[in-house]
Amino acid sequence: MIRGALSGCLLLAGLLVMPGAMAASRYYDIEPVEVAADTYVVFGAQENFNDANHGAIANTGFIVTDEGVVVIDTGPSRLYGQALREAIGRITEQPVVQVYISHAHPDHFLGNNAFDDVSIAALPGTIDAVRAVGSDLAGNLYNLVGAAMRGTSAVVPDQAVESGTTATFGDHRLRLLAAAGHTAADLMILDTTTGVLFAGDIAFHDRAPTTPNADIDAWRAVLAQTRAREFAVLVPGHGPSTPDDAPLSQTGDYLAWLVDRFTQDANDGMSAAEVMFQPLPERWARLAVQPGEYRRSVSHLYPAIEQSALPERTE
Amino acid sequence: MNTISKTLALMLLVLAMPAAAAASDDPLDSSQWRYMLRQYFPDAKVVFDDRVQVVAPDYAEDSLATPVQVRAEGLEDVERVLVLADHSPINPVLDYYPVRAAPAIGFHFKVQQATPIRAAMRTADGTWHVGGVWVDAEGGGCTAPSVGSASPLWESRLGEVEGRLWARGDRSQRLKFRVVHPMDTGLAAGIPAFFIRSVTVSDADGRTLARLEPDEPVAENPVFALDLKHAGAVTVEGRDNNGNVFSARIPAPAS
Ligand SMILES: [Zn+2]
């Protein structure tokens, strides 16, 4: 599907020069929370994109080492990225030396504009996706949240991450774990020094998972593998961090329920709109962004499941 | 609530039942409605009626295939169901004649921009009963080429039908079928309109159970869900605007 004809508007908006600091703080209230030694998370709103949260719905994080600051995800816009950088500057005098992007969704990488003097690393699949659809995603987000997007463009990460490698910054050793399922390329980062696992959008917590580019089977397999890992703190892509695997099991349970629900509905002959508007069980209705996210998932996932419930070519 | 106010509320509800309003007071407040009235219902009696329900998401996640379910609760003698989108280069979405079927149909359609999607149901007395909802969208659904038009593969499968029946109570069945067809609107540059023009569902004796006339905005490889007042196998036959025909026999449900 071709979406986001507004990239042209974005370019235009980029020409409007604003004093960065003032504009950034006008839109974004960045309050880093220390979740472990040297490790901070800026928690996003548990909402869909809107012009009140200015797109800041995902968690971003950073690790302060004595060889510089490592940033994990840059948020939804140039101004968010600038505000994040200013917040880091209030905590440490160390410069930002490395950015990692977890995956190619607009709430996670469109702050790259504020870090274009730093190496930005991502999985090869993420780099390809940002190159292919980054501008469309930025255009769509401009449409949804408006002025806070000014000056934002899709900066393609310049460094490919090799799965299973370890990157060392000061005394922090980061294991870079390639996964897939939420999208075609999902990077998780395990800081073996502190035991903090940045799971990206492989894990959602108390917020309905998003599925526009999902491979549910692959995602569930990654969730099962990740539950078997040792970690001290889990930072999901959306929602509060935990000392246990609650976000992993919640995300896995929701995806399993979603597939079972759709399979049963398809075998009962229900139309997609009927599936969309049926009531949700209490456990899943109370997640943030419901029932909207569930309805989006019907659009993403039901057509294939519906088709598999019809017999092959009726003569 | 005490009994008296409950009774009162119930009476008010009954009074409000055929919630008919003047056709000029569009509950969806669309600038296009007066034009739609003139264009599609000249000289006809048109009322807004809450019994006509259109179920569709308030935002089109996929502007090439947005699900919609049309149905009527407690409206008898519906002879024709016209589905229309106000803000679309092609307003008519689908025309449905539920001959021996409930006035209900589920399918997907293309959304060009934010628009009301409406169902108008004509009852035997000639009155059109109208209901609808707004669907917001990023858009572009009608002017985008179909996936099929970009690939030669679909040509060998053009007109293939996959269908299934489900028993739904006494002598009623849900019929769902999918037809392989690009459903090109003719609005994408260089790709002429190419779409299914008519589909007839009949019983084993050849009696028509339902007839539908899709328009260009119906989604590619359309899936239709109908509620037939009939038990047993049916035949689905159709033709597109280029004269290609297709047909399939859908066997009775297994149980
Ligand atoms: Zn996200």
Image (cartoon, coloured by chain):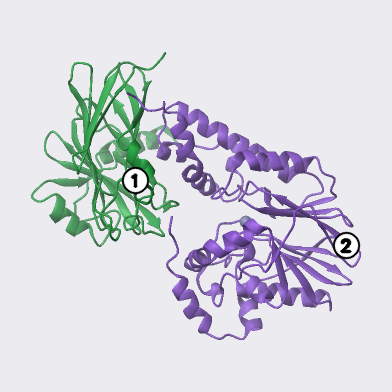
Residue B18: x and y, percent?
24, 39
Quadrant occupied by the C terminus of chain A: top left
Q: Specify whether B111 is left or right of B82.
A: right
Q: In this view of the protein, can residue B72 be seen by the observer?
A: no
- Disc 2 designates what residue? A172
Q: Outermost residue toward the top?
A: B255
Q: Is mark 1 within 8 Å of ligand 1?
A: no
Location of residue A28 with respect to B253 vertically, above or below: below
Q: Secondary structure at mark 1?
A: loop
Q: Residue at x 54, y 76 (%)?
A: A150
Residue closest to the eye, A113 or B71:
A113
Instruction: Look at chain B in the picture and name its colour.
Output: green
Q: Quadrant of the N terminus of chain A?
A: bottom left
Q: Amino acid at mark 2?
A: His
Report, in whole angstroms, how far the alpha carbon at label 2 lies from the one at label 1. 52 Å
- Residue with the mark numbered 1: B219
Chain for mark 1?
A: B
- Residue B215 is left or right of residue B222, and the answer is left
Whether residue A115 is situated above or below residue A217 in the rendered picture: below
Q: Which amino acid is tagged 1? A: Ala
Disc 2 beta carbon < 8 A from ligand 1? Answer: no
Query: Which residue is located at x 17 percent, y 21 percent?
Result: B207
Give the crowd class for mark 1: few <14, some 14-19, many >=20 residues within 10 Å.
Answer: many
Instruction: Spot the purple chain and give its letter.
Output: A
User: Residue B139: in sight, yes or no?
Assistant: yes
View extreme (right): residue: A171
Q: Within 10 Å of the Cα at label 2, are there few (<14), some (14-19), or many (20+) other Cα atoms?
A: many
Q: Position of residue A16 (x, y in %)?
A: 52, 84
Q: Quadrant of residue B122?
A: top left
Q: In which quadrant of the rendered view does residue B229 lie?
A: top left
In the image, ligand 1 is in what quadrant?
bottom right
Residue lying farthest to the left in this orientation: B43
